[in-house]
Image (cartoon, rainbow, N blue to C red):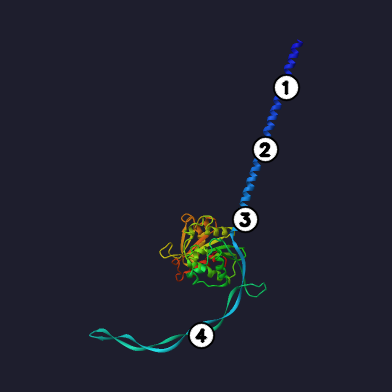
Amino acid sequence: MNGGVIVKKQALLISLSLFCAIIIFTGAASATDDQNTLSSDTSDSTSSSQLEDTQSIYKSSNLEETKSQGVYNSQLVTYEKVKYSYTAKVSYKVRNKKVYYKSYYKKWYKSGGRWRYTWRYVWKYKWTYITKYRYEARTAYRYVEKTSDKPTNNRTVTVEISNIDTSTGADVTKNNVLMKHVSRTSVVNKLIQASRKGTPMIRFGDGTGTKVMMVSGVHGSEIPPQIAMLNLVNSLMDRNIKGTIYIVPFAIPSSTARNTRYWNGKNPNSISNIAGTPTNKILNVAKLNQVKYLGDFHSTKVGGYPGKNAVFCSKYPVYNSYLMAKYISSQTSSKLLTYASAAMEYPGAVEDASNVLRIPAVTCEVLSNHGTVRSGSVNKSYSQMLAFLRYCKIF
């Protein structure tokens, strides 16, 4: 009996030891799993944070790169309105002498029961005039670059002139058709000089308020809007504006200099959605400066499309494109051409690509054959530009 009790005690001890071993093993395994889970969570959080850091660094580096590549050769230029005297050659007419001539008329009389007539004449005269010239002393105002920091009572205007793309530079004075109609003021000469280094841009305003961008010369052979844009630059020197205006008078100076429509064998108004192209860089600068409205100004040849004074726009994704075009059309008697959605037919056009970027844009066209200046086309393009600025409440 004692032997049986001992055997039972030994069996109980063995079972207890086995139970403890199982509990210890299970606890160790669970601890290992918890440790593995903890390390996995830690590594996942570390990798995700590293990814976020990498993305933020990538975004910031892209932003800095965009900022650094946005504009080049930026400089602030102050112009002063000064009075100057000049001698004008004035023409006038002087009455010279009488010239007599016969003036015929019908003399009616009744003969044979019916009315008949015969030709009669009387002597009349008219004066002839000769043109003579005289020289008169006159005074006028112009803006010259201010080189002194001394205070003055004269009106001063500070503008910023920079370059968007340094790969498009050329001497636009080689385009004789263009230069024949350009008023070479001090600020225009500065822009022409800047165009030799690349696509020039001039900023009126201090970069605050409503920001708008106006572009011409996307096609270098479309001369009237480029002339009108330079005329606008001259007129803005005497205007008080509300907001900021970015003006690109020569989108591609190399094309303007050669009076050609193309850039590297391509249509610039069909590749603005391709990175690195001149028109795409213009849109990048517009986006970087948070431009609210954009106007692209062109000319169309007779028999082309649209072949008339017109304004292009779209209703989607920004409805303001349509509202802006409708206003310009009503103010300038230009045909309104509306598309349901941007980038449907012309995805690479400056206007369409801008609307896709949620920057309301329009394309204004005036009738003038490529490489020429049709009578009245410059004034029509200028009126479209003023209507664009009025809609944007810049004036």
Q: Which mark is residue 64?
A: 3
Asked if residue 267 lies left or right of residue 137, the reply is: left
Residues under labels 4 and 1: Cα distance? 131 Å
- Closer to us: mark 2 or mark 1? 2
Q: Earlier in the sequence, mark 3 or mark 1?
A: 1
Question: In this view, which residue lies farthest toward the top?
Answer: 1
Residues under labels 3 and 2: Cα distance? 37 Å
Q: Identify residue type, mark 2.
A: Ser
Q: Which mark is residue 17?
A: 1
Q: Identify residue type, mark 4.
A: Arg
Q: Earlier in the sequence, mark 4 or mark 2?
A: 2
Does residue 134 appear anywhere in the picture? yes
Identify the secondary structure beneath mark 1.
Answer: helix
Say which residue appears at 66% left-offset and 39% top-offset. Answer: 41
Circles 4 and 2, Cβ within 8 Å, touching? The answer is no
- Give the class, few, some or many, for how many residues have Cα within 10 Å of label 1's Cα (few <14, many ≥20): few
The residue to which callout 4 is attached is: 134
Q: Which mark is residue 39?
A: 2
* Quadrant where the image shows the N terminus: top right
- Give the class, few, some or many, for how many residues have Cα within 10 Å of label 4's Cα (few <14, many ≥20): few
Residues under labels 2 and 1: Cα distance? 33 Å
Identify the secondary structure beneath mark 2.
Answer: helix
